Amino acid sequence: MCGVFGAFSKNGQSVLEDVYLGLYALQHRGQESSGMAWIAKNSAGCELRVTKGMGLVHLALDQKELSSSHSNCAIGHTRYSTAGGSFLSNAQPITANYSRGSVAIAHNGNITNATGIRRYLENRGAIFQSTSDTETILHLMAHQSHKPPLDALISALKTLKGAYSLAVIINNRLVAARDPWGFRPLVLGRRGETTYIASESCALDIVGATLVRDIKPGEVVVIDEDGEKSLLIPKETERKFTCAFEYVYFARPDSFLDGKSVYDVRKKLGQKLAQSAPCPEADMVTGMPDSGTISAMGYAEESGLRYEKAIVRNRYVGRTFIEPTQRVRELGVRIKLNPIGEIMKDKKIVIVDDSIVRGTTVQRVIAMVRESGAKEVHIRIASPPVKFPCYYGIDTPTSEELAAARMNIEELCKEIGADSLSYISVSEMLDAIGLPHHNVCTACFSGDYLNGGKDDELDL
Ligand code: SF4
């Protein structure tokens, strides 16, 4: 998962601060590295500049450099790796200068046939600078240098399988592109003469822009001094999908995805959970901070149980799901969450969480809650069991590491040390999201890989 943001100002105002702020709002989508690329105009013409670093936006990017620079066309990226390791060489935007000009690409998603494309291009002399799947797009463009760069980009995109939401600079144009299946979100916004593209609408709010619309699956939007132009990636696809996990866990609750409020969906997930998995003997409901809290409020509202914010999260620790190693993950849980013993003592507690991936976090939290004196701990999960890996840009682990793939619900309940454990069903989750069911990807819950799953096949 990653965050992308881009801005183009028709009246020449600098957008660098806006892109920095936009990335700040998208920090939850990636914390491993951050970067920005922009077009700087000088007496010699236009020049593509880039700055990248490891870590959070405010640590990775040099604010002094940005405040002393000027650009009306810029993109940015917050990364967490799904293809390619967590190194500076894989930080984005990835840039190149070739015979047709300058290109910078920021990518959210996972190109499932990148290995095959890479092999094909390497056999024809290409040398890659990174292990990131995104670099294949640049090489595919350079491979068609007889075409204007925008045509070369669209032609490259036609070759790709899997998920991509892109913010691209081609010379002095900003380009947004969303894969024909629409796995990852991408929205268009506007403030005055400035047009924005962003992974989520919360990043438009921070720059004072209005959400215009979602970029459509398979759409390429070109933004330049002449305005906006919408083009299509010429690829036949049977269905359009939006990722259910964005609503369940990943997106910020103040975002709208495909016209649906993430906050509303999470609340409904909690309400449906209370209907299908009630716990009338409980004294209170609490949520696993932060992504379980809204569903916990929905659960409490629907069940009539008292809601308490009984587990406190240290805000200065990253989300454990994003951190790369098991050891860091385990340490993260211990320093990240702290139950308030006074509230929990001698109580029967329902804890609502968004999902169980490896099971490490919930297991440790249950142990901590019991140590705090809770009498019973009932776990309610506001999504179905995650049993299958994601190949479309979310770093779910392999099936062997997924707790619900290794155990049935009773075994898992015992393993994590809960008094009871319940999930909602796939159809309940789809009802809460409220989009047509056949337009939502549920592959990591159902195993129904709508776009063929992992696929190294080459189709050039
Ligand atoms: S497999 Fe799961 S995480 Fe991946 S796109 Fe589909 S719903 Fe989202």
Image: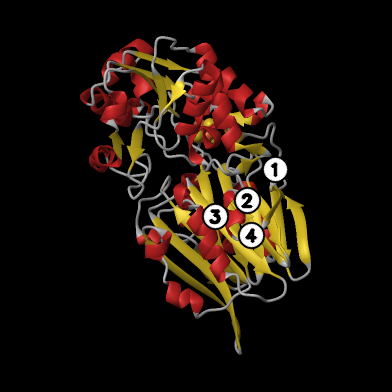
Say which of 378 and 373 sits in front.
373
| Residue denoted by label 1 | 235
| Residue denoted by label 2 | 157
Residue 167, image x and y in percent? Answer: 59, 57
Q: Is residue 140 at all visible to an observer of this figure?
A: no
Could you give the CA–CA distance between mark 4 and mark 2, rounded to whole angstroms? 31 Å
Residue that lies at the very extreme toward the left in this rendered image:
371
Is the distance from the Cβ of mark 3 to the nearest ligand 1 atom less than 8 Å?
no
N-terminal of the pair, mark 2 or mark 3, is 3
Q: Is residue 177 at all visible to an observer of this figure?
A: yes
Q: From the image, state whether disc 3 or disc 4 is nearer to you.
A: 4
316 versus 258 height, above or below: below
Left or right, 189 with respect to 399, comes to right
Task: Residue 82: give its label.
Answer: none
Residue that lies at the very extreme toward the front in this rendered image:
342
For image coordinates 28% across by 14% down, the residue present is 414
Task: Residue 208: give its label.
Answer: 4
Q: Is disc 1 surrounded by few (<14), some (14 to 19) or many (20+) residues within 10 Å? A: some
For image coordinates 63% across by 45% down, the residue present is 179
Residue 367, image x and y in percent? Answer: 24, 25
Residue 152, image x and y in percent? Answer: 65, 60
Give the SS element for disc 2: helix
Q: Disc 3 residue type? A: Val
457 versus 305 height, above or below: below
Task: Residue 4: give its label.
Answer: 3
Say which of 202 and 167 sits in front.
202
N-terminal of the pair, mark 4 or mark 2, is 2
Q: Disc 4 residue type? A: Gly
